[in-house]
Image (cartoon, rainbow, N blue to C red):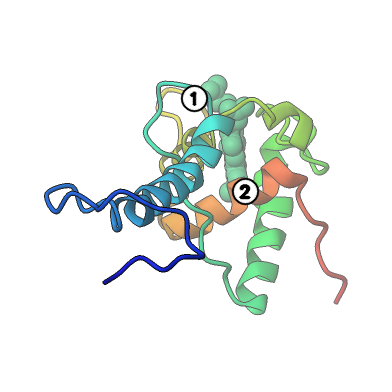
Amino acid sequence: MRQTDDRPPAPRPCPARRPDRAPTVALALAALALTAALPAAANGPGLSPGPTPGPTPDAARSDALVRMVRQDCGSCHGMQLTGGLGPALTREALADKPLEGLVATIYRGRPGTPMPGWQSMLSEPEAQWIAERLMAGFPQEKMR
Ligand code: HEC
């Protein structure tokens, strides 16, 4: 391919380095790293890349999950989730906590504490969905 006059002269790419592909790959990697870094940054250093946002359960299931959190979790964490036997689960209270840890606590419980695991009631993505919603400020139950 010959250089045209309106383009600035560019050095011939060295065939071994494929500089024509490298920027694309680097850009894709940078985008990937950025995506991975966002939740990781929120979770503080030293953690594996944060989980990507979980799938959203369908409307009926999310209503059921909201009701469960308000009622079953509320029995220990307070009906407004502001704390009781268990600590507050408000947005403010959870602000600095890593999402992974909250998901693990909900899904597996905290051995040696009254916090039970909910694996028999929830899938792990649902535990993550709840943790994400708690961190954002948990929704109220829908009136029926
Ligand atoms: C039997 C009482 C009880 C029930 C029911 C309960 N929890 Fe807990 N939960 C606790 C206690 C106690 C702790 C604190 C454990 C500890 O000391 O580390 C806790 C801790 C947590 C934490 C970690 C909070 C933090 O600040 O790290 C989350 C998140 C949580 N519970 C969510 C839930 C959710 C969601 C439910 C319902 C699906 C639920 N809990 C139901 C007692 C309960």
> Mark 1 or mark 2: which comes first in sequence?
1
Q: Is residue 51 visible?
A: no
**Label 1 is placed on what type of residue?**
Thr
Residue at mark 1: C-beta within 8 A of ligand 1: yes
Residue at left 61%, top 52%?
Answer: 130
Q: Nearer the viewer, residue 1 or 35?
A: 1
Which quarter of the image is occupied by the N terminus?
Answer: bottom left
Q: Residue 94, image x and y in percent?
A: 68, 31
Task: Tell me how far mark 1 sits from mark 2, CA to CA.
Answer: 22 Å
Q: What secondary structure is found at the residue carrying circle 1?
A: loop
Q: Position of residue 28 (x, y in %)?
A: 40, 54
The front one of 135 and 39 is 39
| Three-letter residue code for mark 2 | Glu
Residue at (47, 54) in percent of width and height: 8
Q: Which mark is residue 64?
A: none
Quadrant location, ligand no. 1? top right
The residue that disc 1 covers is 113
Looking at the image, which residue is at 61% across and 73% down? Answer: 61
Query: Could you say where residue 118 lies in the image, as x and y percent from the top left?
Result: 47, 50
Q: What numbered label is drawn on residue 132?
A: 2
